Image (cartoon, helix red, strand yellow):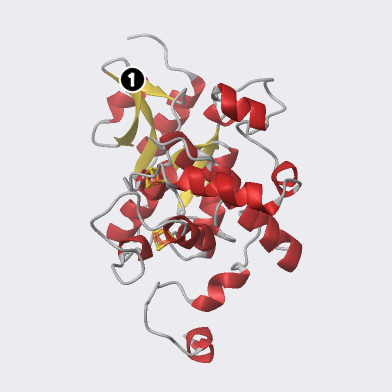
Amino acid sequence: MSAMTPIQEQVHQWLEEERVDIFLAYRIVEGHPLPYAFTREHIEETGELVTGPARYSLEKFATHIASRYPDARIGMVARDCNQRALNVLRVWNQLKEGQVETVSVNCCPSDLRAHADCSYLERRPVGVVKQQLGQVPNQAVADVDAQPSAERFDRWMYEFQKCIKCYGCRNICPVCFCNECSLEHAELIGTGHLPPDIPIFHLVRAVHMAGRCIDCGLCEDACPAEIPLRLLYRKVNAIVKDLFEYETGSGDTLPPFSILGPKPTMSPTPLLAVAQE
Ligand code: SF4
Ligand code: SF4
Ligand code: SF4
């Protein structure tokens, strides 16, 4: 057996010393790096642990484990985006303080390497028309805001009508954790047709991401219709920052919209009652 890397040794030690019950990282399966849960029971597998180049919301696995085993101590490799997501999940009581212990890996923006193995920095190619219109991936919110509102409206309606309602954006998102999702509520989003009701389907999700989205870009990576979702959520978080000076993912306080309560509901609820819960 070849010598273990420092990170493999560290995870082996954490499991052996019972510092964590489970460790979330990656393992090469059939030539692909896939998310994997390393355990004490199969501690020899830590020799196969890798940290990249894949990028999944490991913290989403952590919240599922924590909801089933509330006392589980979870270890995880974490990039910057994972850390921000963990902050949000703690704030929203999806993970207990100190429940997840992380091992940091190179990420972007990083002082350690000019270009880390992270799709965050990859610029996806766009077609000629989009290039001519200046609709480049990873576009700055300010650049879009500078365009006339009618143009912006047409652009977003064009993007939204490509949606095939696959829920990939929600399913991959580390901070989409609701048991009942508004996007599947028939009174809000009609069923039986594609695209889903636009723009309401996307605006519902965008509103829910205000003060929650940590700009990991996984939704946009997952979207088969290549809708610039991240740009949309950056916009709502720019509004949250401007209006409330709330920096999503960095603090330990609930975002301003938490006054609406953690459970989406179609019944009007007095705000005072929600605040007292
Ligand atoms: S960028 Fe997308 S996947 Fe990542 S937190 Fe925001 S909405 Fe969720
Ligand atoms: S209700 Fe909103 S925040 Fe909750 S899972 Fe659905 S889209 Fe995500
Ligand atoms: S991932 Fe893209 S196509 Fe699928 S529901 Fe989300 S926006 Fe629509």
Where is the N terminus found, in terms of image quarters? top left
Does residue 262 appear to the left or right of 30 in the view shown?
Answer: right
Within the image, what quadrant is residue 177 found in? bottom left
Q: Which residue is outermost to the top?
A: 2
Residue 240 seen by the camera: yes
Out of 98 and 253, give the one closest to the viewer: 253
Does residue 72 appear to the left or right of 273 in the view shown?
Answer: left
Q: Which amino acid does label 1 sit on?
A: His
Which residue is found at the position 59% from the left and 61% from the top? 211
Q: Position of residue 181 (x, y in %)?
A: 34, 63
Q: Is residue 197 above or below residue 219?
A: below
In terms of image quarters, where does ligand 2 lie? bottom left
Which residue bears the numbered disc 1?
32
Q: Where is residue 31 in the image (x, y as percent from the top left)?
A: 31, 15
Q: Position of residue 264 (x, y in %)?
A: 40, 72
Q: Where is residue 100 in the image (x, y as percent from the top left)?
A: 46, 50
Out of 198 and 96, give the one closest to the viewer: 198
Distance from mark 1 CB to nearest ligand 1 atom below 8 Å: no
